[in-house]
Amino acid sequence: MVLAFACIPFLLASCELFKKAQTTPGTDRSKEELDAIQGKRVYDPVTGTWVTVEEVVMEKMDTIMWKEVAATTYPPITSDQSVDVPANPNQPIGKKEHNSELLSAYNVAYVLPFLTDRFNALDATIYENSYWALHFYAGARMALDVLSQEGIRLNVSAIDSKASDQTVTQLTKTNKELAAAHLIIGPYRRDNVTILARYAKDKDIVLVSPQSSSSNSASEDNENYVQINPSLETHCQAIMDHALKHHAPKDIVLVSRDNAAERARLTYFQDEYKKWAGSVNVAPLSELIITDQSVALDNVNMLPFIQLSDTTVFIIPNWEENFVYSLLRKIDLSREQYENIIVYGMPQWRDFERIDFDYYDKLNVHISVSSYLDPLSPEIRLFKQNFYDRFGAIPKEEAFLGYDLTLYCGRMLKKHGTKFQYFLNEEPTKALHTRFQIEPVIRVGTTSGVELPRVLQFENKFVNILRFYNYQFQPVN
């Protein structure tokens, strides 16, 4: 495996993330310390043992004169593993459907916000916003080692997007590694993704976006764009699917504030319900539209929506913490003790700090998330240990993302070639942090009166549904 690290070597070398773990302060290191240096140890052929020379004669060192020698005259020594490397590092070895080329090796460019322009070599600290890229790429490096052991050859370039539209635009015009890539992974910001998605479409290169969840990131129909983070629509569909599997439609209430953006979210749920019912004419699910602008929602009457002596399911596609807190409090005050309430919320609820988790417990809160790390999983524990041993840091969630995505894409490249995105729906895969269940997003178009499906992009459609139980979120799907 060939690694070509562009733009970031000085940042990685100086970053605490890539240092070995240090001994914990305060621990007894007396057994670990080396003995004091006694002098030079030499072999005594008479006694057949090594002895210490107390007095070492220091001779004056000669001055070394360096001279460059042509590699053709004295070729470098290489390992035996290199003998099977073809002269052309990307030699064609076959073809598949969709004009997908199978190659002996593939060029992969990571375009991530390392933010090297914010790094100060005189300051020991790392710019805070660089950590996402550093952990993502550190996880990717661990996956690259696994792929190398599997015989998958990737020529890797790491490129700093600097989270800048101007920088990314310039990269598309001048960067040679980007132009030679068969696969681009990144960047982070949605606007940066839009620029690279257009570039990938024009150059016929696959772009895999690890972070953006916007369904508009590709900006236009783009069969070279793969979105790993499920969109809001996909989250809503997953919530609706789970709710309908466990509850009757009459028990479900969709909740929104009275503004166009939030009310539009309810359409995702109603459309998914119509698909489930198999009819566009089915009566819509109940909706509670909140017009009350008060902080405590004093004028909101929940009673007409709560089922007496039965289960009521509230679905709240909102992530503004103050509003969610007030609404959960209002629901809890409105219900009787014998009435069962279940609330579905959004991924951001997991990170709320102000809301009393007693509400999550009493109201049986469920949320959708794109990533879930099982703290009891032996595989996840092993990854954490290996990451810490290698980099001296506890891996953040993005380290798992970088590892899982690199491993998945590398194997798909090897198996399916340069157009591997067309085969992803055939390869659902369980990863450490999620499940890759990537499907084409289809738009039905009309040409001369004949409806033809068009691929807008490819998107991971798997969403975890977590339930708050025993004061922690646990998967239920």
Image (spheres, rainbow, N blue to C red):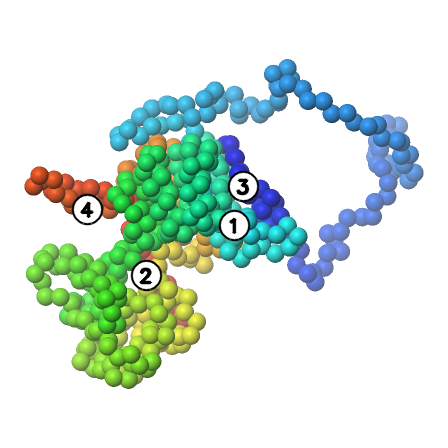
SS label for mark 3: loop
Q: Distance of mark 1 from mark 4, alpha carbons?
A: 37 Å
> Mark 4 highlights which residue?
443
N-term mark: 1 or 4: 1
Q: Does 50 appear above or below 347? A: above
SS label for mark 4: strand
N-term mark: 2 or 3: 3
State the mark number for residue 368. 2
Q: Which tag is nearer the camera, tag 3 or tag 4?
A: 3
N-term mark: 1 or 2: 1
Q: Quadrant of residue 363?
A: bottom left
The residue depicted at 73 percent of the width and 52 percent of the height is 32
Dot 1: within a 10 Å radius of its alpha carbon, few (fewer than 14), some, or many (20 or more) residues?
many
> Mark 3 highlights which residue?
7
Name the amino acid, label 4: Arg
Name the amino acid, label 1: Leu
Question: Horizontal placement of 36 versus 163: left or right?
Answer: right
Name the amino acid, label 2: Ser
